[in-house]
């Protein structure tokens, strides 16, 4: 009897502030074109995508301003930490995203980089619209109220 493999989506980097600063409209999974040292650096979990964004240039999707630190054991074969990285998506997905960005003024924000069950590095990309200050205050009030509501229910129950 063969054991079933548990799906482990190991998160390498996460953009925790994205859901606070942006209203998420749609998400999709994109592959990343990485070098060997970048994968090893990702597995160490020291990557940062907090200030990064994606853009469409020349019919391709690129991840800009992501920081994957150098892999120390690679010495002279290392990668550049802040280089532009190509995102792998289908042409129809690319056209849909590029159209929404140009037409509606939306932004492509990376939410997290993770390893799927096959060990491939994937990027969860969101089509988002920026929130203004009143929206952020409303989200903060909502979060505080939900926390307080949970405390009250816990005390009664």
Image: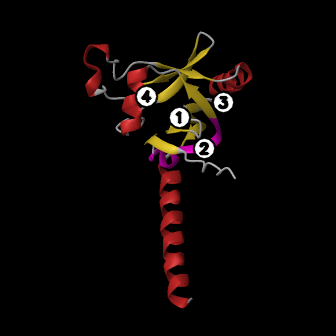
Residue 81 picture location, percent across and down: 34, 23
User: Which residue matches tag 4?
Assistant: 39
State which region is magenta. 16-28
User: Which residue matches tag 1?
Assistant: 109
Numbered disc in front, either 2 or 3 = 2
For mark 4, give the secondary structure: helix
Choose between 39 and 108: the one closer to the eye.
Answer: 39
What distance separates the C-alpha of mark 2 from that of mark 3? 14 Å
**In the rendered view, would you say 142 is above or below 129?**
below
Choose between 147 and 80: the one closer to the eye.
Answer: 80
**Residue found at the far right of this picture:** 92
Q: Residues within 10 Å of mark 1 (few under 14, many from 20)?
A: many
* Residue 48 visible somewhere in the drawing: no
32 falls in the magenta region: no
Residue 66 picture location, percent across and down: 41, 28
User: Which residue matches tag 2?
Assistant: 24
- Disc 1 vs disc 2: Cβ atoms closer than 8 Å? yes
For mark 2, give the secondary structure: strand
What distance separates the C-alpha of mark 2 from that of mark 4? 28 Å
What distance separates the C-alpha of mark 3 from that of mark 4? 34 Å
**141 to the left or right of 67:** right
User: Which residue matches tag 3?
Assistant: 104
Numbered disc in front, either 4 or 1 = 4
**107 to the left or right of 40:** right
Marked residue nearer the N-terminal end (4 or 1): 4
What distance separates the C-alpha of mark 3 from that of mark 1? 15 Å
Q: Which quarter of the figure has residue 52?
A: top left
Q: Which quarter of the figure has residue 76?
A: top left
Marked residue nearer the N-terminal end (2 or 3): 2
Q: Residues within 10 Å of mark 3 (few under 14, many from 20)?
A: few
**Residue found at the far top of this picture:** 58
């Amino acid at each position: 009897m063969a054991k079933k493999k548990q799906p482990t989506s190991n998160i390498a980097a996460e953009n925790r502030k994205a859901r606070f600063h942006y209203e998420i409209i749609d998400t999709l999974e994109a592959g990343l074109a990485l070098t060997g040292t970048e994968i090893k650096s990702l597995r160490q979990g020291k990557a940062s995508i907090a200030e990064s964004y994606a853009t469409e240039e020349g019919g391709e999707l690129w991840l800009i301003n992501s920081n994957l630190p150098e892999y120390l054991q690679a010495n002279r074969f290392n990668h550049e930490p802040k280089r532009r990285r190509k995102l792998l998506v289908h042409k129809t997905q690319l056209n849909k995203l590029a159209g929404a960005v140009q037409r509606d003024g939306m932004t492509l924000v990376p939410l997290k980089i993770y390893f799927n069950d096959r060990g491939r590095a994937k990027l969860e990309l969101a089509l988002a619209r920026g929130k203004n200050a009143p929206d952020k205050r409303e989200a903060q009030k909502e979060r505080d109220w939900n926390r307080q509501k949970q405390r009250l229910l816990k005390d009664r129950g």
